Image: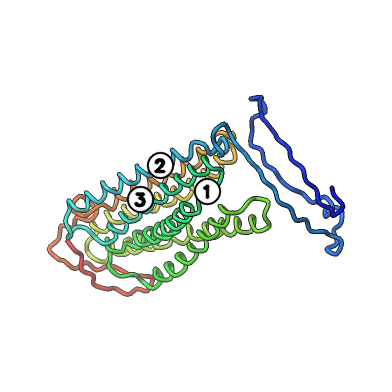
Amino acid sequence: MDKNGYFETSFVIYISDAKLEGLYSMFFHNCFNFLHHSSAERKAVDFTILIEEKNSDSYLSAGEMPLPALYQMLSILFFLSGCFWVFILKKNGSEQVFRIHWIMAALVFLKSLSLFFHGVNYNKIATNGIHMESWAVLYYITHLLKGGLLFFTIVLIGSGWAFVKHVLSSNEKKVFMVVLPLQVISNVAYIILEESEQGEATHNFWKEVFVLIDLICCGAIMLPVVWSIRHLQDAQHTDGKAAVSLEKLKLFRHFYVMVVCYVYFTRIIVYLLRITVPFQYEWLDSMFKEVATLVFFVMTGYKFRPASNNPYFVVATDDDDEEVLIGSSSVREQVTNRK
């Protein structure tokens, strides 16, 4: 330490024994402030630190090294799934395809783009030790759009929009007004978490904000599905089309179970997996989360495929008008189903 109070040092840690392999972290503690609790006695510290962490020829940790290839592979799978979905929509013609089907296609391609940019970003980190801002920004933009569109699509499908009715009730519109802004805040919190370190003062705050808002959104998107199930149960006894209502009721019950399983697996099971697996298998939680998302997309697409291939939406009736109960207000509206 010189006369001005400046101190400079350097050290190298080399792990040469396989028994010493593990997940290492470096934290700085101002020990002086631990002994002096009064704010007047505490002293601020200003320092610059250069850290180089490297595993063989990669700057990623052992648990992150497979992620670039994993994200690129999953990006291709989502892209091929999206192409197959578009092929199905084109094959069925415009009369059997609703706008929600194209929204679902946009979601799949957006997910593919997000994974592609994420993989490239990780590849740049592995090569250079830092990410390139251009790729990181592209990933954050597509991730934010994908997150908002995912919840938007789930709420639309859960409300029965286009499949059962062509208007949204006031309660369903309120869900949109709550979920979409919260999703923006949630994704902003996620970006801040990605760009900050554990030791920063705001890191834990934004982590709590992210978890809380994400759980609120997951709970909110279940409401339209529950309302649709109740409406179909009422319609089963009142509109004289019990068989059709029963088939649609089964469909939305299945969708409710799918959403619950998806939320439970990606939010809880994946978290438990992350904190229990050894450090070199940390990439497994990302793999299981993305595979679960792919399975959820495929099952949702199969359940809500165009009407000509879907027994749930083939209505054998001469009447083109189907009466459905919309919203929680006992108001009945006549909606014309497209065939």
Q: How crowded is mark 2: few (under 14 residues within 10 Å), some or many (20 or more)?
A: some
Residue 254: image tag: 3
**Looking at the image, is 22 positioned above or below residue 232?**
above
Q: Which mark is residue 131?
A: 1
Residue holding disc 2: 72
Quadrant into which the C terminus falls:
bottom left
The answer to which of 289 and 61 lies nearer the viewer is 61
Specify which label sits upstream in the sequence, 3 or 2: 2
Return the disc, 3 or 1, that comes first in the chain's sequence. 1
Q: Residue 275 carries which label?
A: none
Q: In this view, does 11 lie to the left or right of 339?
A: right
Q: Residues within 10 Å of mark 3 (few under 14, many from 20)?
A: few
Residue type indicated by callout 3: His
Q: Is mark 2 on a helix, strand or loop?
A: helix
Please give the count of numbered marks on the rendered protein: 3
Identity of the amino acid at label 2?
Gln
Residue 324 in the image: x percent, y percent? 27, 67
Query: Badge 1 local density, few (<14 within 10 Å), some, or many (20+)?
Result: some
144 displayed left or right of 45: left
* Residue found at x 32% / y 75%: 331
**Residue 168 at x, y percent in the picture:** 34, 69
- Contact between marks 3 and 1 (CB within 8 A): the answer is no
